[in-house]
Every structure is written in C-alpha cells, then in structure tokens.
Amino acid sequence: MTTERERRFPGPRRGQLIFAVVFVLFSAFLLSQVPSETRWVAKTGFFAQPRFWPATGIGAMFVLGALYLIKLPWHRFQAADWIEARKWASALEYAAWFMGYVFVVPIVGYLPTTMVFVPALAWRLGYRSRKMILISIAFAIVTVIIFKSFLSVKIPGGMLYEYLPGAIRSFFILNL
C-alpha cells in the first residue's frame, strides 16, 4: 500500500531505487580503493595531497548517494524498476560490439575488421536496405583511408597480414 509521501512524489518512479542502490554500492567500492590507488605524501600541504581531492569527491558521491537513497519515498523494487534497468543495460551491447572490434583488429587487421563491423552495426541498428549496407561499407573504407593515410594513426597490422607476400604485406601493414 502506498503512503501519502509516495503518491505525492513529483518525478518518475521507475528505476530510481535501482539507480540509487547501484550508485551507492559503486561509490563505496571506489572509496574502498582510494588507499591503494592514491598516496599520502610527507611534507605536502593538506589540500595538495594526491589523496585529498579524489577522496573528497568520492566521499561526497557516497554521502550524497546514500542521502538520496534514504530520502526516496519508497524502498521496494517494482516491475517498472527492472524494466527500466533492462533499458539501461541494453546500452552495454554497444560496449560489447566495441570490445569485440578492439579484440579482432589485431588479429584480422583494421580494414577487413572495419568493413565487417560497420555494416554489421548498421544492420543491427535497423538499416537493412542494400543501399544503406553499401553506404556503410563505403563509410568503412573512407574511415580507414582517413585514419591510416591522412591522419597517420598508427594501428598495428593484423596477424593475418603476416601470411601475405612481402610487398603486399608491407602495403597492408602500412596502409590498411
């Protein structure tokens, strides 16, 4: 049964409790890492200590997150909370795509990997017409040319390039 305070809450309810709990737990984890990740330097002013400002910021994250959690008018998870959390988690799919791309580039090479991942992502985003797939392939090629040739970004050649004949292998490693 909802209380008067819960009924009068002006904002959307869905996902706030999950956000607050995750925020407090994450900031508590970060706060526990401050002693091992920063240090206290002798003969240095209090406010100039390398540990002071990170600890202050993360401590404020924890305290303010805990106050937010305490001040929420409800403390029970509902179905809408889990639906909202699934929407948030769907963004992690694109992080997985990116990590897959990062792991495949050193094996297959920049150009072939880009020419596979860009159309695959276009397909995943709903651009399924032949025209859009061809545009995504052209975009992949132009991106590789701009990054490797004009911007001279040093991306290691793929391990598969090692099996190409000498001159072609050098060209692929340097340009593709």
Image (spheres, helix red, strand yellow):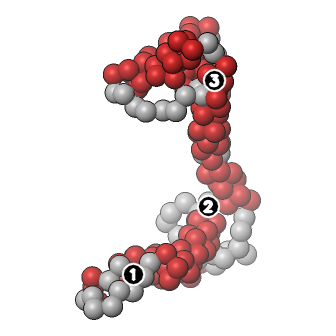
Residue in the image at 27% along x and 88% along y: 44
Q: Is residue 45 left or right of residue 95?
A: left
Q: Is residue 37 left or right of residue 86?
A: left
Q: Secondary structure at mark 2?
A: loop
- Of labels 1 and 3, the one closer to you: 3
Q: Quadrant of residue 81?
A: bottom right
Q: Nearer the viewer, residue 25 or 109?
A: 109
The answer for how far apart the CA atoms under marks 1 and 2 are is: 33 Å
Among the two numbered marks 1 and 3 on one chain, the one whose residue lies closer to the N terminus = 1
Q: How many marks?
A: 3
- Residue 153 appears at what percent x and percent y? 40, 31
Amino acid at the residue labelled 2: Gly
Amino acid at the residue labelled 3: Glu
Q: Is residue 140 visible?
A: no
1 and 3 marks in contact (CB < 8 Å): no
Residue in the image at 33% along x and 91% along y: 42
Residue in the image at 50% along x and 63% along y: 11
- Residue 165 appears at what percent x and percent y? 61, 12
Q: Which residue is mark 1?
A: 51
Among the two numbered marks 1 and 2 on one chain, the one whose residue lies closer to the N terminus = 2
Residue 15, numbered circle: 2
Q: Secondary structure at mark 1?
A: loop
Amino acid at the residue labelled 1: Arg
The answer for how far apart the CA atoms under marks 1 and 3 are is: 47 Å
Q: Secondary structure at mark 3?
A: helix
Residue in the image at 56% along x and 81% along y: 32
Is 47 placed above or below 112 here? below
Residue 162, numbered circle: 3
Within 10 Å of the Cα at label 1, are there few (<14), some (14-19), or many (20+) other Cα atoms? some
Q: Quadrant of residue 134?
A: top right
2 and 3 marks in contact (CB < 8 Å): no
